[in-house]
Amino acid sequence: MSGNWVMSNEQQALDRLHKSHYGKMVTAMLQFSRDIDLEMAEDIVQDAFCSALSMWKEKGIPENPSGWIYTVCRHTAINILKRKKKFINPFENNDQTIETYFYESAFDDEQLRLLFACANPRLTAQTQVVITLKYVVNLRVESIARALGLTVNGIDKLLVRARQKIKMENIFLKEPSATALQSRLPVVHKILYLIFNEGYKASSGKELIRYELCEESLLMTKTLLDKKISDADTSALYALMLFNSARLNTRFTAGNQLTDLEEQNRSQWNTGLIALGNYNLRQARSEGVSSYHYEAAIAYLHCRAKSFETTDWQTIVQLYEKLLAIENNLFIQLNYGIALYYASRKEQAFSTLHSLQKTFLKDHYLFHTALGKLYLLEGDRVKGKHYLLHAQKLTQFKAEKNFIENLLKREQETERSIP
């Protein structure tokens, strides 16, 4: 019994480390030598994780697990490069040690450096985003596909092409010079935005909200501002994250039931984060207005509203229209359609939402949930139940399934109460 328990602890520790550090290790191997390509880097790291379990069973979990894995990866890489007679010690004349190369914290500056390294201009913007989400943030391919509105097969093919290009063109993923950091900011902003969104509403896994990803993206964005590697868009992005974070803890009730914006207890929203968001939104004023400015302004209007009913939906609709002019994203169109409904432009709202049925959103939980709720509000119980039941089939999260179940129960009670 005790032996199984020890093994379980080791497996759990390794699983946690794989989740938080696998991508960082792969990227570090790419930075270690130009002669290590993506495929080789992944093989080296995977072998290190495979050998770790048996070693840790025998000798116990090391004090610095990530440093242990990195040491094994580094020794393996050196042996491979020596056999190829291509080894040059990257730590020569460098005080950096193996032990300090990786820290236990997922929020250290190393991850931000890797993020900038993957934002290599020799790769397309889409490729930069995908390899960073895969190898730095360690998101699953399914999560990346949903975040970018692509198919899993499309992401797999993009990763294959990326590996080939990095290998054939000898692209070295390393941190750019200080003068080049600013030029990579737009891609870095996009990645941080996607990391936060994945945390706010996970697309796969066991947890609907991944708080560590929200915190990670907040801390990295704040680091950009603190280090002055930033612009007005950085401040707007940070404000957006803060406004959404302020409402994060009210997305579930004390009974662990998922709530929507209408039902959230606004007295429990974090006023400190909202105030900080206001400050950063003011700091974000500039001649150019980005999608982050518009999204932050929309989030601000939600945060300042005393109730769902008193929300300034007319202004929110106008902001969505400006946002769509520069960022024609399907999820933004979905939210625009919902805002149109609450701004009493119902015919246009349903027209906008139904136009999305020909896109990948037809297989998305949020789309069917939105239509189902709006049809129930309109008194069309047949269509409302149809969309809600379909939404329930499209989610793997128990919290979302229960949320739909509660909506349907309430509707049944309302139906029974009608004489």
Image: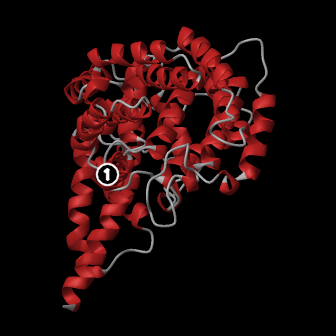
**Residue under numbered circle 1:** 405
Viewer-nearest residue: 90 or 224: 224
Viewer-nearest residue: 416 or 35: 416
Q: Does residue 418 appear left or right of residue 38 in this picture? A: right
Asked where in the image residue 118 lies, by quadrant, the reply is top left
Q: How far across and down, in percent of the image, does residue 302 sit?
A: 66, 36
Residue type indicated by callout 1? Glu
Q: Does residue 206 appear left or right of residue 51 in this picture? A: right
Color style of the picture: secondary structure
Image quarter (top left, top right, bottom left or bottom right) of the N terminus: bottom left
Is residue 93 visible in the rendered structure shown here?
no
Asked where in the image residue 276 lies, by quadrant, the reply is top right
| x 40%, y 20%: residue | 126
Asked where in the image residue 235 lies, by quadrant, the reply is top right
* Mark 1, secondary structure of its residue: helix
Q: How far across and down, in percent of the image, does residue 359 sit?
A: 29, 18
Q: How many marks?
A: 1
| x 33%, y 50%: residue | 416
Viewer-nearest residue: 29 or 93: 29
Q: Residues within 10 Å of mark 1 (few under 14, many from 20)?
A: some
Against 314, is 56 above or below?
Answer: below
Viewer-nearest residue: 356 or 297: 356
Q: How far across and down, in percent of the image, does residue 376 sit?
A: 39, 35
Q: Residue furthest top?
A: 325
